Image: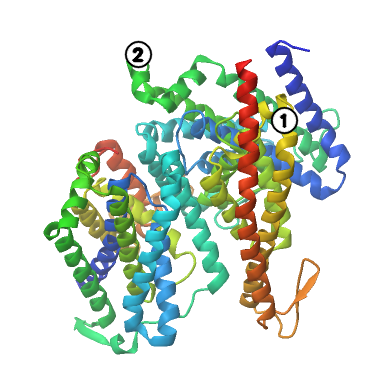
Amino acid sequence: MTLSPFLRRLGLWGITALVMVVLPLLLRQGFALSMLSQMGIAVIFALSYNMLLGQTGMLSFGHAVYYGLGAYFSAHALNAIGAGKLGIPVTLLPLVGGVAGLSFGIVFGYVTTKRSGTPFAMISLGIAEMVAACALMFPGFFGGEGGIATNRQVGSAWLGITYGPQIQVYYLIAGWCLLSMIAMFALTHTPLGRMANAVRDNAERVRFVGYNPTRIRFMMLCLSTFFAGVAGGLGAINYELVTAENVGTVVSGNVLVMAFIGGVGHFFGPIIGAVLVSFLQSALSSYTQAWLLYFGLFFMVMVLFAPGGMASLIMIHAPVVRAKRMGTLALPYLVSGLLALVMLAGLVGLVEMIYFLETGAEVGKPLKLFGLALMPSTTGPWVGAMAVMLGGAAAFAWSLRLVRDAWARVHAYLQVQEGL
Amino acid sequence: MEFFVVQLLNSLSYGLLLFMLSSGLTLIFSMMGVLNFAHASFYMLGAYFAYQISRYVGFWPALAIAPLLVGALGAMTERFGLRTVHKYGHVAELLFTFGLFYLIEEVVHLVWGRAPVDYRIPQALDFAAFTIFSTSYPAYRVFMMGVSVAMLLGLFLLLTRTRIGTIIQASLTHPHMVEALGHDVPRIFMLVFGGGAALAGVAGVIGGNAFVTEPGMASAVGSIVFVVVVFGGMGSLAGAFVASLFFGAIQTYTVAMDYSLLDLAARLGMGIAADSPVRGLLSVSVAQTAPVLPYLLMVLMLIVRPTGLMGTRET
């Protein structure tokens, strides 16, 4: 069955919308709902970031500036609505954030987009540090250390929507998320989106055909700051608190990591990245204190071995799936995956034992890990963990050969297919 | 006057310390095109290594061993990390060092904890060197300046008087030509990366106990070092030197000045109403602007002169 590209795309968006509607009904715990809300915000933010990194080739270390400022302006607007000074419905509040992000995007973007490549990255970092420092300088607007608290249950309820229960906030976020996703996807098909890709690939040739790369960078940055601001506005509604950390470098680094892990080369990459990273952050942080370390290691492994992110890992399998040859890869993948888990278990054991000692655990109390009670004060567990890690690493390195062989067979098959 | 002279000495020692970091960073950046995000992490590692080593064998051996360890770590980073991602382009390299920065911070959390460690200046240097007016000036600061100047002199001689220095200098301006002449550029990269890391390590050893040795020290210094490199101009050691001293001075002087535009207005006889909307903006004191000032100056510099103070090229 072949569908026209338009219908297929429509179907994909329909499925996305359906998933977003149904998910909170399946996962009924409050924890899941707040995580889904967080994911929705992260998806918009990461996609807006990828308009810079993936589509225009601009590596920014300060995208949180626009997210955070959007959040601050939204929080102030929300408070103004509460005080009866402003008459816009809460549903449209993210627009306030978007316009705020866009305004600062125009001002800062004018300065930053004059340069590209590494200098752009450095200037974006400089501006981020500047705004972060300003956030503590002007407590009137930024609320100092405590931040700006707000209340989303303001204005008149429309159709009984007060945004009191989290489920209503989730659907608000989901709606804005879907709209933003469609808008940002549509943008990639406009002449501007195409020229942005050209600027990324070869700015000089863009100049030859009569476009101004600086202007294209500027326009893309402005549009991306709008969506970052929308995400910020949703953040203000969701958390009802905006602190100076929102404009800080940690948030900027986070969105970069999301987009990169997901994959900057494909439109849907940052969506995967945002969902995965948000999930890992909530899930890992409740299990271990060392989660940032694991997370950093994960990021480094991706940078070193899969610079195209999750999306590229998925996409290289698309032709294999189409040729129905996944069976060849399945067994090697399974073996490698299990051995990687063994190696990881050893590493986790070591790290957790170090943390256990570092955080001053009570003497004589064991560390519970993988259903074992380990005594880090004795040498046994250390030798064991080390052996598991090194043995796992050696076996994993060996199993990679299986994967490589399987891939060689699949490639040979695909080439024959193409030849026919 | 006393304030001025004491702060001058402080800013000089801080500026020289900054140059030990920025010189390595600018060398690496100009040669390899890699902005090493983790450069200040090597500074932090220098401080922590020195702390650990000095607990066993004292400060003086640590002064030599810690930078060597950090340098070796830097060389390994280049050899096994950066060289692997090099084929994916500059963005991947930048992201690699960015990840390394986070990873090193987390490892420091893991090994030494989140609180500052008790890394003290050695007993032998814990006395007052001389007295200016009524302030006695600590000998350790003088020692810091001495070490910095010795290191910089060594760097200068290495770059101008030796063969490898000549090649490095040539790589700053004509990297492709050097490659074409048949020099093993990847090996030079590794050496420069290791050397730059070692220099940052020295700065960490002597700076860690003068200031505070804590996990946040890398990000605190790192962004300033970036500013210094951009402000001074890419590929210009002289520019980095001037910018280091300049920002050393700016940071040292401004934090001690508690004046604001509001004071100025009052002195000029202009009263600003207490409920005036501009009052909040005017009451910001010079000391409060200290964290913003370097970044503001950097952005202004890039608008006025994109190559930086003494840089000859834009990227």
Q: Is residue B7 visible?
A: yes
User: Image quarter for residue B256?
Assistant: bottom left
The residue closer to the viewer here, A383 or A239, is A383
Residue A297, position in %: x, y? 57, 55
Q: Which mark is residue A210?
A: 2
The residue closer to the viewer here, A302 or A99, is A302
Asked if residue A25 lies left or right of residue A219, the reply is right
Q: Is residue A240 visible?
A: no
Q: Chain of mark 1?
A: A
- Quadrant for the N terminus of chain A, please: top right
Residue B128, position in %: x, y? 26, 86
**In the rendered image of this protein, does residue B128 appear above or below residue B158?**
below
Name the residue at 68% across, 25% down: A179
Asked if residue A363 lies left or right of residue B203, the reply is right
Q: Which mark is residue A325?
A: 1
Residue B81, position in %: x, y? 45, 52
Mark sitting earlier along the chain (1/2): 2
